[in-house]
Amino acid sequence: MTVNKRPIIIPWDYTEKAEFALLHAVNITKITNNSLILVHITKKESDNDVQSTRLAGIAQNIQEKYGIATSSIVRSGNIFSEITKVINETDAQLAIMGTHGMKGLQKITGSWALKVITGSKAPFIVVQDKPLPKTDVTKIVVPLDFKLEEREKLVWTNFFAGISKCKFFICYSETGDEIIQKRTIGNIKAATNYLEERGINYELHQLPGDNSLAKETINYAKKIDSGMIIIMTTKNIKFQDYVLGANEQQIIANDSKIPVMCVNPRASI
């Protein structure tokens, strides 16, 4: 198999959650043949030499254990900006990050993850647990709302359909606002056309609309035992979104520990 030159980035903090991210990455690279890059951000540049040696050893062990080309990068600075820089510099295909999402900490950990994710041109898969045993069909939930950039996530339905047997569950809620409803319907039509043209297995599902789209998406994903949720991050997200809790935070730190792919809006898609 030809080596995929675009790596998968794994932010590495030596925790069990980073190990979980690695296991998810290994499952993907068995099919896509990406290389892996472990990235650790230090607070002080004086720590870089020690951490570089330590992380290089871990990368070597991973390469020997799984047969996957693995390297490491250690930088000092702000974790929120440095990881994004590495992703952009290496032209990474995606990043897989482990995070905590225990009850009572959802807002804090969701906010932390969201700060790392926004600004990256590559999507993030955020995981809270090790991969579940493989099933015959992976169920992936894709919520849609009225925003035009929602259509960008469809590229990743094509990606996952190409590497595993998947069924996509396109979810939406009705609204009393005529303009928003019209735009939502437009996105639904675009999504179903995209999937049908490519022969991708999907099901359209209307959510009750009693709660926020984020909460109902989580509830539905849990109900059908979904293996992943694909969401878009908020375009030009502001500080108050981090403080008050954007919808993405709720989904990222869902208490069912369902992996979440976060796609950042890009004009160049």
Image: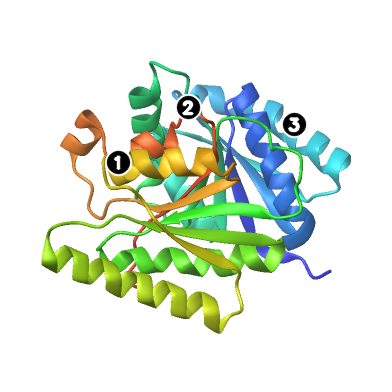
* Residues tagged 1 and 2 counted as in contact (Cβ below 8 A): no
Q: Which amino acid does label 1 sit on?
A: Asn
- 132 or 136: nearer the eye? 136
107 horizontally vs 67: left or right: left
Residue furthest bottom in the image: 197
The residue depicted at 52 percent of the width and 64 percent of the height is 203
User: Label 1: how many residues lie within 10 Å, few (<14), some (14-19) or many (20+)?
Assistant: some
Task: Provide residue 59's location: percent of width, then percent of height.
Answer: 74, 37
Q: Measured along the vertical axis of the image, is residue 217 above or below residue 77?
A: below
Which circle, 3 or 2, is nearer the viewer? 2
Marker disc for residue 142: none
Marker disc for residue 255: 2
SS for callout 2: loop
Q: Measured along the vertical axis of the image, is residue 51 above or below residue 173?
A: above
Residue at numbered disc 3: 58
Distance in Å between CA atoms under marks 1 and 2: 14 Å
Task: Provide residue 117's location: percent of width, then percent of height.
Answer: 41, 44
